[in-house]
Each structure stands twice: as C-alpha cells, then as structure tokens.
Amino acid sequence: MSLKRPLAPGRWWQGVIYQVYPRSFQDSNGDGIGDLKGIIERADYFSWLGVDAVWFSPFFTSPMVDFGYDISNYLDIDPSFGTLDDFDQMVAALHARDIRVILDYVPNHTSDQHPWFIESRRSRENIKRDWYFWRDAGPNGGLPNNWQSLAGGSSWELDPHTGQFYCHTFLKEQCDLNWRNPAVRDAMHDVLRFWLERGVDGFRIDAVGCLAKDPALRDDPPNPDFRPGDPPFARNLMVNSANGKDIMEFVGGIRGVVDGYPGDPVLIGEVYLKTGEIGAYYGPELRGLHLPTNFNLLWTPWKAKPLLEVIGAYEAVLPRGAWPDWVIGNHDQPRIASRLGREQARIAMMLLLTLRGTPILYYGDELGLQNTEIPPGKLRDPFGLNMPGTGQGRDPERCPMPWDETPKAGFTTGDPWLPIAGDGPRSSVQFQRADKSSMLSMTRNLLALRRNEPVLSRGSWSPLPLEDEVLGYVRSLGKSRFAVLLNLENKAQRLSSTEITSGRLVFSTHERDRHAPVKQNLELAANEGVIIAL
Ligand code: NOJ
C-alpha cells in the first residue's frame, strides 16, 4: 500500500472516518442496490470531500435478513454487492487516493444459514454444538431466561428438531456465537487475518459488548427507568446479557491479531455506553479498542449546559493517552437533521468536526439529509417491522444517496431498494457542490480547515462557559488557540462574556467577512457557529 498524501502527525485513524452504507451509496448495474463497483465509481468523492478513511457496513455473503449483518460466509462478497475481485479493485482505488478501508466485523452472531450454525443445529452431540448457545427450556417449559432481543421479542428461539433453544441478541436469523469456545475465537480470528492479508486497514466491531454474556446466563434485572412507549428490550438492563467481565479478554485477542499486521490497523468498537463506562474498552495499557464509539452526543439534550457537561465528562474519564471519538449519526439512528432541524444540523456538524478526537461521519449527513418518509408497504427493516410504533425502524436513515438532479439522483438506473433520500434536486451532491453556502460546502470547508490546522484535531479541549445557549470551547496546541462558539438557538445572541475580547475569525457557518478582527460582544446570528483564532 502506498499512501502519498502527508497525514497530520499522529496516527491515521486520528483523522476523519466516513461511514458508507453500501446498499445505498451507488448502484452500478441497475438492480437498485448499491455495490462495490459503484463505490469505485464514486471514489473521487471521498478525496474531494476530504476524509481519511471509509468504514463500510457489511457486504459479505448474507441472506440479507438484516441487510448484511447476518453473515453466512465471512470470507466472500455477497453477489448483490460484487465479487472479491471488485473488492480488491475497490481497496486499490481507495488506497490510490490515500483513503483507508475499514470493514465491518460481525463477531457476535452468524446467519442461521452459516455452515457453522447448520452443523450446530444438526444434533445435541454435534461437534459445533458448543459454538452457539443452546439451552433446555426453563422451569415449566418456559424460556431459558428473560433476555430480550434487540430486534424485538425474546432472545431465545426453540429449535424443534433438537428440542433446545438457541440465543440471538438480534433477529432469530442471527445466532449468537459462543466466544468462550476457543475454536470459535480461532475461526473468527482467521476472518480478521483473511481481510488484513487482502490489505484492509481496520475493522469496526459490531455489538462488541455482546460477546461477553454471563456464563451462568442469569436473568437481566428490570430497568427502573423504563417508560411506556420505550422499545420492549428496554424493560431490562443488559447487565448479564452483555458487557461481562471477560469482555476485554476477547477484545485483547482480536487486538493481538490486528497488531501483527503493518500499517497500524484500527479497531473501532460499537459500544452504546455512557461516558463513565466507555473508558474500560480501551483496555489495560490501551491494548483494547483504539476507538470505542462514543454515542453520547446522540442522546444528550441539545442545550449548551448538558452538552458541555457530557463533553467534559467524557474528556475527564478517558484513560491517559486514549484518543476520543464522536458520532452524530449512523445506519441505526434517526438522521441528525431530523432530530435538530436543518439549521442546527450545521451546528452539529461543526461540533463533530471541531471536538478533540476522531469524527465518524455518516454518509449523507454532509448533505443535511433528513429521515426519508417510507410508504407503509415499502418498509424493509425487520427491526421496525417487528416493533411497530416504537420508532425502531431504520429505513428512514438508510435511503440512497442523491448524487445529481436527475429523477433517480444518479444512484441507479433501476428501482431503488428504498426511496432516494432528500427533498429533490436541491439536496443532491451536484446542486450543493455548486452552492457555496450549502451544508456540503460548509462540511468540506470545515474538513479542509481541520486538516490544515492541527489544533482542531489534536489540540486540548477546554470548556468556555458562556451565558445563554451558546456552546463554547477552546482548542489549544502550542501557541495556537481556537475558540469555537456555537449558537444553539434560532435567534441572534450577543456574547456578554469577557472571555473573547479579540481574535481573528477563521470560520463561520454564515456569510461573514473572513479574517475580520473580532471585538468584544460579538453577535452570533441565529444558528450561527464561528471559529475564532485567539
Ligand atoms: C448493530 C448494527 O449496527 C445493526 O445495524 C445491526 O442490526 C445489529 N448490530 C446486529 O448486527
């Protein structure tokens, strides 16, 4: 692999990671589903935008019950996405542009169509029986325990053939692997090696906390904060069904494999945890995950005080030397521009790209895409279909990328598998590229600024408590000090603080005289964010 573009000092995964949901990025063969050849066609977009790496949601062989998170062969590409040859070409295309490739690694469960599970369910004595969690019925013929599937219903499914239940943290077609079995660990480590040998630069580990379940499979305790309308799985706290004490042994084993490869491969881990709980996933002496995902911005009220508190709390609990990361969207969460509105989505993007740590940017958030309305007959996500009325459906945030102003938005020539995202031509990349004030142009400018000003990626972070609803903080590196001021309200606000008495404006979400000197009592326009060099 030859990487030409000079990277900022530090490690490559301290740059910006862009998430692609492959079904919805670019279709090359008119079947309405995005594919690897389509990604190759769009490779220039990643470098034009200015990201450092792309994480791809799964494109491995799969019955597609959970659209690729149910894998029946970890070592091949699903025909709907292409071939291993296409994969090699895609990696080459991205590496030629100095963009790293991060794959989605799904270790907690295989598809029920995976040969391992087909073997395992054959008989109670099968050599692969212990590769999965098989249990007899509980007392009175009930379920083995009270664990709830995150896809709706119980985590246990009866297999009539052998009369035992198997465990599935997600859909019943996603059968949980038993990571306490060394043969399972070896087989899953081989999966990592296979892709590392093919040149990938790291992995995002799906549902990593679920690998460590209570060995005695004890019930989960009830959640005292459960409210009517919450999804059914929220009735319990996932104390025994996930995040067990030996999780770091499994993570450490995975880390041991990737550390044997050159190029500093990264491990990102999907952990939905509060700030105080994330730190453990970096592991003793930082020998665990490089980037346990930090989703805290997703569930913090959009107000200056709680946001400053959560950012400060996270910074404070990170182990020494641990590198932070930030997320404002992914393929499982409502679009940020729907949660906050279009104007505040710009502010959220600015927050994401000006905090200390790696931003993980979900495709289409750079366009300010909102949740797409899906006509009732067209819903695809089984989570949503299993749990109607609970807001668990994920189709709205997974819709195809609008590239241009043509009716099918340049995504496909066929029938797109979900409606194209956006509100028509003005949402498209083509339109927004030409519009200097668009969300896309703003995001690209911010990415460029972040690349040119190391203080924005590596500088220390300190809060700037301001009055009213302006979120403020200062980034510092050597002599460089940047203040970031984000107006969280839809009305102009004048700063009364004496903290910012002078400086030079280096960025604004709005039209402003760049490089104009900043005086005391700066007024921010409604929904405006600025960066000031102090
Ligand atoms: C988390 C993934 O992000 C989600 O999309 C998937 O459905 C579950 N894990 C199961 O793999």
Image (cartoon, rainbow, N blue to C red):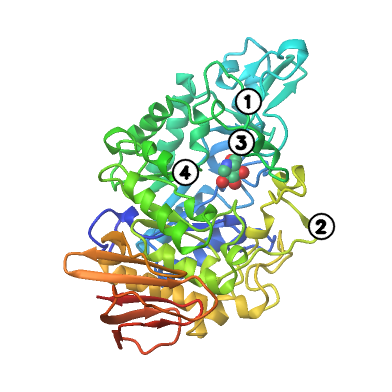
Q: Are circles 1 and 2 on residues that touch, CB within 8 Å?
A: no
For residue 284, say whether it is visible: yes
Q: Which amino acid does label 3 sit on?
A: Ser
Residue at the spot x=73%, y=11% of the render?
A: 139
Question: Which is more N-terminal, label 2 or label 1?
Answer: 1
In depth, the one of 158 and 93 nearer the eye is: 158
442, 182: nearer the viewer: 442
Q: Around disc 1, counting alpha carbons within 10 Å, would you say few (fewer than 14), some (14 to 19), or many (20 or more)? A: many
Secondary structure of the residue carrying tag 2 is: helix
> How far apart are labels 3 and 4 at the CA level?
33 Å
Under mark 1, the amino acid is Phe
Q: Is mark 4 on a helix, strand or loop?
A: loop
Q: Label 4: few (<14), some or many (≥20) within 10 Å?
A: some
* Comes first in the chain, label 4 or label 1: 1
Q: In which quarter of the image is the N terminus?
A: bottom left
Amino acid bearing label 2: Pro
Mark 2 surroundings within 10 Å by alpha-carbon count, few (fewer than 14), some (14 through 19), many (20 or more): few
Tag of residue 117: 1
Residue with the mark numbered 3 = 72
The one of 491 and 272 positioned closer to us in this rendering = 491
134 above or below 95? above
The image shows residue 169 at horizontal and vertical percentages of 62, 32
Of residues 190 and 424, the one nearer the viewer is 424
Q: What residue type is labelled 4?
A: Lys
Which mark lies nearer to you, 1 or 2? 2
Q: Name the residue under label 4.
A: 274
